[in-house]
């Protein structure tokens, strides 16, 4: 079971609806048109339409599986004093004194450029359950990071 923010759940549902209602019918039409042109073995349009169809079906099934196995997280029920899913955490890398700020999210919402790290990442997993002032140790490829939690916000 995965937990998603309401926003991400809605984004996935919207993408799924778009693929089913808009994209797939266009691919089906292109496939029928390419098929009507004759010999399929030497028909690049047909092969491309089949490739797009397979890719779209794969994406539809993937998104359906995410939605079937996900629940929207009730932020009111989450602890405010500990790092948890959907917490925005500011922490200091004790080796470099660099301050960083990330939101802890499910793997399906991870986006480093937007400041969102997965709770299953080494840093995300190390921060989970910690309180302000505590030190988290994250095992990363370059070694062990010691991170001091500076603040926790649940937006």
Image: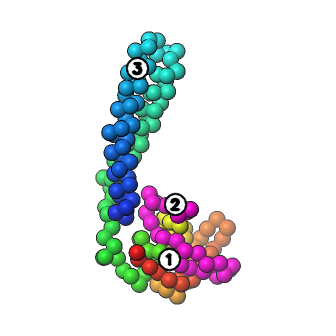
Distance Cα–Cα, label 2 vs label 1: 15 Å
Label 1 vs 3, first from the N-terminus: 3
**Mark 1 or 3: the one toward you:** 3
Q: Residue furthest top?
A: 38
* Residue at image location 41% in from the left, 71% down from the top: 85
Left or right of 3, for residue 144:
right
* Residue at image location 53% in from the left, 78% down from the top: 90
Across and down, in percent, residue 73 comes to 33, 67
Image quadrant where one finds the C terminus: bottom left
Across and down, in percent, residue 48 comes to 49, 27
Residue 146 appearing in the image: no
* 39 w.r.t. 101: above or below: above
Label 3 vs 2, first from the N-terminus: 3
| Near-viewer residue (99 or 137) | 99
Secondary structure at numbered mark 2 = loop
Is the residue marked by circle 3 packed among few (<14), some (14-19), or many (20+) residues within 10 Å?
A: some
Secondary structure at numbered mark 3 = helix
Q: Which residue is mark 3?
A: 33
Residue 102 magenta: yes
The reply to whether dot 1 and dot 3 touch (C-beta < 8 Å) is no
Is the residue marked by circle 2 packed among few (<14), some (14-19), or many (20+) residues within 10 Å?
A: some
Q: Which residues are magenta?
A: 89-114
| Near-viewer residue (102 or 22) | 22
Q: Which residue is mark 2?
A: 111
**Mark 3 or 2: the one toward you:** 3
Determine which quarter of the picture holds residue 136: bottom right
Q: Residue 89's mark?
A: 1
Distance Cα–Cα, label 1 vs label 3: 53 Å
User: What is the tally of numbered marks visible in this picture?
Assistant: 3
């Amino acid at each position: 079971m995965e937990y998603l923010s309401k926003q991400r759940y809605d984004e996935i549902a919207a993408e799924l609806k778009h693929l089913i209602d808009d994209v797939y019918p266009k691919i089906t039409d292109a496939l029928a048109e390419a098929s009507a042109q004759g010999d399929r073995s030497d028909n690049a349009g047909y092969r491309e339409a089949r490739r797009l169809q397979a890719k779209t079906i794969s994406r539809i099934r993937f998104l359906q599986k995410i939605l079937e196995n996900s629940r929207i997280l009730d932020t009111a029920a989450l602890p405010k004093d500990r790092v948890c899913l959907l917490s925005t955490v500011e922490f200091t890398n004790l080796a470099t004194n660099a301050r960083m700020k990330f939101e802890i999210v499910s793997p399906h919402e991870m986006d480093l450029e937007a400041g969102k790290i997965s709770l299953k990442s080494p840093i995300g997993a190390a921060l989970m359950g910690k309180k302000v002032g505590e030190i988290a140790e994250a095992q990363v490829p370059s070694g062990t990071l010691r991170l001091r939690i500076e603040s926790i916000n649940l937006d």
